[in-house]
Amino acid sequence: MIDQDPLGLARVSIQAKRYAVANSVGPSDIRHFFGSLDRHKAAKGVFITTSSFTSSARETAEYQSKRIVLIDGEQLASLIIRHNVGCRVEEVLEVKKIDENFFE
């Protein structure tokens, strides 16, 4: 649970599943998560998986009355790299270009 304001009026619920690539999150997982939003008095939710979501799971999330953001393994990796969370620079590649003005 994340309280977005000091009074806890805007609460976000997060669920994360560490699944193998072949084990996709289905619509029943999304429905269970949606049910937990009311139980925890959350206005919205973020469902994260290391695998993927089935098309019916995406459709189920889209049609719920509360906003549920889905982040699959590919998006998660992109966010991790973009925000430097749990990763480090392995190698830096410097590309040089001749400055034509220098030789005039």
Image (tube, grey):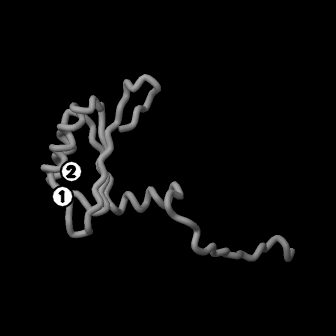
Q: Secondary structure at mark 2?
A: helix
Image coordinates of residue 73 in percent, x first then y, are 33, 61
Q: Residues within 10 Å of mark 1 (few under 14, many from 20)?
A: few
Relative to residue 7, is residue 95 depicted above or below? below
Horizontal side of residue 26 vs 67, given as left or right = left
User: Could you tell me which quadrant the C terminus lies in?
Assistant: bottom right
In the image, 3: left or right of 62?
Answer: right
The 10 Å Cα crowd at callout 2, few under 14, some 14 to 19, many 20 or more, is some
Residue 67's quadrant in the figure? top left
Q: Residue at x 20, y 39 (%)?
A: 34
Kindly check if marks 2 and 1 are in contact, taking CB atoms under 8 A apart as contact. yes
Left-right relation of 65 to 45: left
Three-letter code, disc 2: Arg
Asked whether 1 or 104 is in front, the reply is: 1
**Label 1: which secondary element:** loop
Q: Nearer the viewer, residue 80 or 65?
A: 80
Numbered circle sitting on residue 102: none
Residue to which mark 2 is pinned: 58
Q: Residue at x 22, y 31 (%)?
A: 38
Q: Quadrant of residue 90?
A: bottom right
Residue carrying label 1: 54
Instruction: Check the picture and name the quadrant holding the N terminus.
Output: top left
Residue type beneath disc 1: Thr
Residue 11 on image: x %, y %? 35, 31
Task: Tell me: residue 86, above or below residue 90.
Answer: above
